[in-house]
Amino acid sequence: MHANGAQSPSAAADPDRIDPPLRRLTFTLIIGALAVIFDTTIMSVAIDSLAGQLHTSAEV
């Protein structure tokens, strides 16, 4: 900011730039959604093996 109150061109907000807190929130939500998908996939693959080791069926 200059003495007269005007911002320098490099400090002016770029309308195409994403706000850093919004970017962090977006990445956090994406990683959280992927964690749920990976957990579901791992459990659906491993459920038969777990049922066999526990000598039970995986049927509901």
Image (cartoon, rainbow, N blue to C red):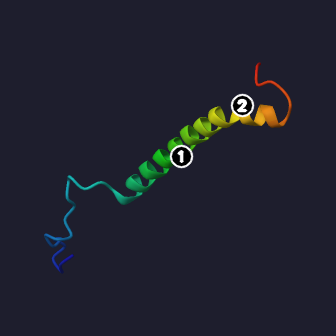
Circles 2 and 1, Cβ within 8 Å, touching? The answer is: no
Identify the residue at image location x=17%, y=71%. 10
Identify the residue at image location x=13%, y=69%. 9
Q: Return the residue nearer the eye: 36 or 21.
A: 36
SS type, badge 1: helix
Is 36 displayed left or right of 59 in the figure? left
The C terminus sits in image quarter: top right
**In this view, 2 is above or below 31:** below
Identify the residue at image location x=19%, y=65%. 12
Identify the residue at image location x=33%, y=56%. 19
Q: Residue furthest right?
A: 55
Give the mark, 2 or 1, whose residue is nearer the N terminus: 1
For the residue marked with disc 2, what is the amino acid? Asp
The N terminus sits in image quarter: bottom left
For the residue marked with disc 1, what is the amino acid? Gly
**Badge 1 density bin: few <14, some 14–19, many ≥20, Cα 10 Å:** few
Rendering coords of residue 2 (x, y %): 18, 78
SS type, badge 2: helix
Rendering coords of residue 36 (x, y %): 58, 40
Give the residue at mark 1.
Answer: 32
Give the residue at mark 2.
Answer: 48
**In this view, 12 is above or below 56:** below
Q: Return the residue nearer the eye: 39 or 27.
A: 39
Q: Return the residue nearer the eye: 13 or 4.
A: 13
